[in-house]
Amino acid sequence: MFYHYTDTDALIVTIDVDDFTMAGNTKHVMTMFKRELSGHYKIKDLGKLKWLLGIEVKRIREEQSVTLLQKAYIEWILTQFNLQDAKPVSMPLDPQHKLDTSPCPATPHQLDDMCDVPYREAIGSLMYTALGTCLDIAFAVSHLSQFMQNPGRLHWEAVKRVFCYLKGKKDHILKSCSPGEQGLQGYCDADWASQHHRHSISGYVFMVDGGTVSWSSKRQPIVALSTTEAEYIAVTHATKEAVWIHTFIAEIA
């Protein structure tokens, strides 16, 4: 992200490889930037932002809000993994089935059974969705990614369940910049030794002016000896993110 301020103008530009979008306080400052940039590079102006990296962007001026939607991407990955006709489910993981390494293939026959299963590709597709707009699958994707080295049939069925969950949620949007809510707000939590590896899971979510901007679900690096210790570790990671977001906002404000 790059920004430029003068006494009267403000311009913010975000870039990903060869795609970029920008925001300014006036149309004049954005037009001048595009004119200056086109004098040095060949660029293509696509007009008002509607799509960015597979995410549909809609601006609702009456509500002073911006919505993000990955419906097209979700439909595409469902088709890629032949799950477009799958039946939607209400939860991304079945809480009655605790996954561990026991279903991992151990015999040549079991390895052959899983050799053509696109487990890594599916996790990668889901990870982009979890990072983009679907924070409700962050834990599921993080949990299932632990078995990428040697996934078993039960792990693959759990991955397909996440796709089924997304099919039922593909019309859900991520809404940002809602009026009436001001400032930075954050929430964090942790479980304690609920997984087979005994590492607790930290989770947090942060909102700016009522819009969700950052979230995480991650295995803690050490084994906590109590619920209190697990909570302290979670708060530590959340605090680091809060400090970064606060510094970032202060820098571009």
Image (cartoon, rainbow, N blue to C red):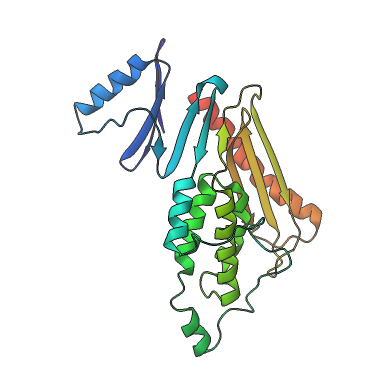
Q: Is residue 247 above or below residue 18?
A: above
Q: Residue at x 80, y 58 (%)?
A: 226
How many numbered marks appear? 0
Q: What x and y, as percent, mark residue 143? A: 61, 62
Q: What x and y, as percent, mark residue 61? A: 51, 21
Q: Is residue 12 visible?
A: no
Q: Quadrant of the N terminus?
A: top left
Instruction: Answer with left or right where residue 160 lies relative to residue 233.
Output: left
Residue placed furthest toward the bottom: 108
Along the line of sight, the residue nearer the viewer: 248 or 195: 195
Q: Residue at x 76, y 59 (%)?
A: 192
Q: Is residue 133 above or below residue 114?
A: above
Instruction: Answer with left or right where residue 142 lies relative to residue 47.
Output: right
Quadrant of res 141:
bottom right
Along the line of sight, the residue nearer the viewer: 27 or 92: 92
Q: Residue at x 65, y 61 (%)?
A: 93
Q: Is residue 10 above or below residue 206?
A: above
Instruction: Answer with left or right where residue 73 lies relative to residue 210.
Output: left
Q: Is residue 246 visible?
A: yes
Q: Residue at x 55, y 65 (%)?
A: 160
Q: What x and y, as percent, mark residue 222? A: 67, 61
Along the line of sight, the residue nearer the viewer: 83 or 159: 83
Along the line of sight, the residue nearer the viewer: 195 or 93: 93
Q: What x and y, as percent, mark residue 101? A: 62, 75
